[in-house]
Amino acid sequence: MKLFENPAGFWRRFGALILDGIVFMIIGFLFIGIDNKDTRDSINGVVQLIYQTALPIIWFGYTLGKRALGIRIVKKDGGTPTIGTMLLRNIVGGIVYGITFGIALIVSIFMVAIREDKRSIHDFIAGTYVTSNPPSKEGLVD
């Protein structure tokens, strides 16, 4: 497979982010009965981290939003992301966006919109990219 084959562009990635946000809102309603806002926010944050980290590992790079739009996260070689890959992508990438007060996020938006490989800062950190290619048949379980 060619490196960075069929990279997904900004609008599909953004649409998947919106759909995943709707999933988080629905999940958040499950915790609405918890009176302590800090506890509720903490639980919601942990659920989101698990969703964004574990689901792509067990589901060939997909989240629900990405699956709906036909895109998925893969390692640079086209393989399914590992736990280390996803922790780098989500946690370290998130830290970079946070310590730059969102400036790195704005740079990432331009990178996905302009670069030929459509990779953002968190993709570079984790050695990933987002592709329109489905998983290979060898990786699927019948």
Image: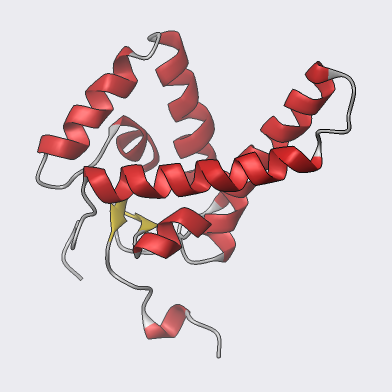
Q: Is residue 86 left or right of residue 100?
A: right
Q: Is residue 19 left or right of residue 131?
A: right
Q: Is residue 61 visible?
A: yes
Q: Is residue 46 left or right of residue 33?
A: left
Residue 57 place in picture, x, y as percent: 55, 58
Residue 81 drawn above or below residue 42: below
Residue at figure coordinates x 38%, y 9% from the top left: 100
Residue at figure coordinates x 37%, y 14% from the top left: 102
Residue 59 place in picture, x, y as percent: 54, 66
Residue 21 place in picture, x, y as percent: 52, 41
Quadrant in which the C terminus is drawn: bottom right
Pick the residue in front: 39 or 131.
39
Residue 137 place in picture, x, y as percent: 39, 85
Pick the residue in front: 34 or 116.
34
Residue 52 drawn above or below residue 76: above
Q: Is residue 62 left or right of residue 15?
A: right
Residue at figure coordinates x 45%, y 60% from the top left: 61
